[in-house]
Image: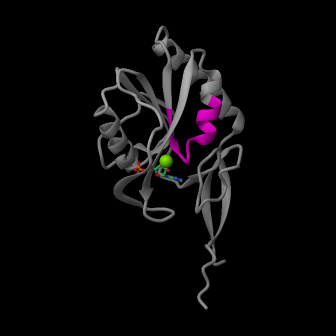
Amino acid sequence: MTDTAPPAYAIDQLISAKAIAARVEGLAREITAHFAGTDKLVVVGLLRGSFVFIADLVREIELPVEVDFLEASSYGDAMHSSREVRILKDLRGEIAGRDVLVVEDIVDTGFTLHHVIYLLQARGPRQLKVCALLDKPTRREVAVKADWTGFEIPDEFVVGYGIDYGQRNRNLPYIGKVRFTGAP
Ligand code: IMP
Ligand code: MG
């Protein structure tokens, strides 16, 4: 039998829960100011990594909001982008003529966000903006940028606050970087 146990790793805190909360509040303030006066903002969370972020963010946005979700697959395996983006779960609602805010956990190579923006723009929203919690600008392969970014981070594999490594660690309240410690 082959051993399929993942390599042993430790998680070093990169961004504290307190720092995240303060930044989310700041982002929500800017987003509220930008969309002020719009009828009902559609906040689109990209599953699964954005679920914690979107939950905190919408509670700080002081406007009527509707929440919808889209799931796109981008990662071929746990750590490497497949460069091929597929829609696994589409929105439930229509966005034609609506004001839309896409909420993403991390912009890495940019393939996912680029594809999602292309797909959603084709549906004719009145405006489409993007808020990403994290950005790894040095990893970019497709030119794409969020309108609001929580934190720019170095090229590290991160987990926590909704973000996983092999479907684990989404429930950490902070963001940490994965450090491999040797054989399992
Ligand atoms: P992109 O298409 O390369 O920009 O990939 C973006 C997606 O890959 C993000 O939405 C995450 O789901 C995932 N991803 C990128 N970097 C990390 C990371 O450091 N930890 C966990 N998931 C990541
Ligand atoms: Mg994602």
Label count reads: 0
Residue drawn 70% across the image and 48% down it: 172
Residue 164 placement: quadrant: bottom right
Is 120 positioned to the left or the right of 177 in the image?
left
Residue at the farthest top position: 37
> Which residue lies at the image location 46% right of the left edge and 12% below the top edge?
38
Most foreground residue, 9 or 130: 130
* 105 up-or-down from 55: above or below: below
- Depicted 168 relative to depicted 143: above or below: below
| Magenta span includes 45 | yes
Rendered residue at 61%/73% (across/down): 7
Can you name the residue that lies furthest to the bottom here?
1
Residue at (61% x, 61% y) in the render? 179
Q: Position of residue 56 (x, y in %)?
A: 65, 31
Q: Which image quarter: residue 23?
A: top right
Magenta-tinted stretch:
44-56
3 lies left or right of 113: right
Q: Position of residue 52 (x, y in %)?
A: 63, 40
Name above or below for residue 40 compared with residue 154. Answer: above
Quadrant of the frame with the N terminus: bottom right
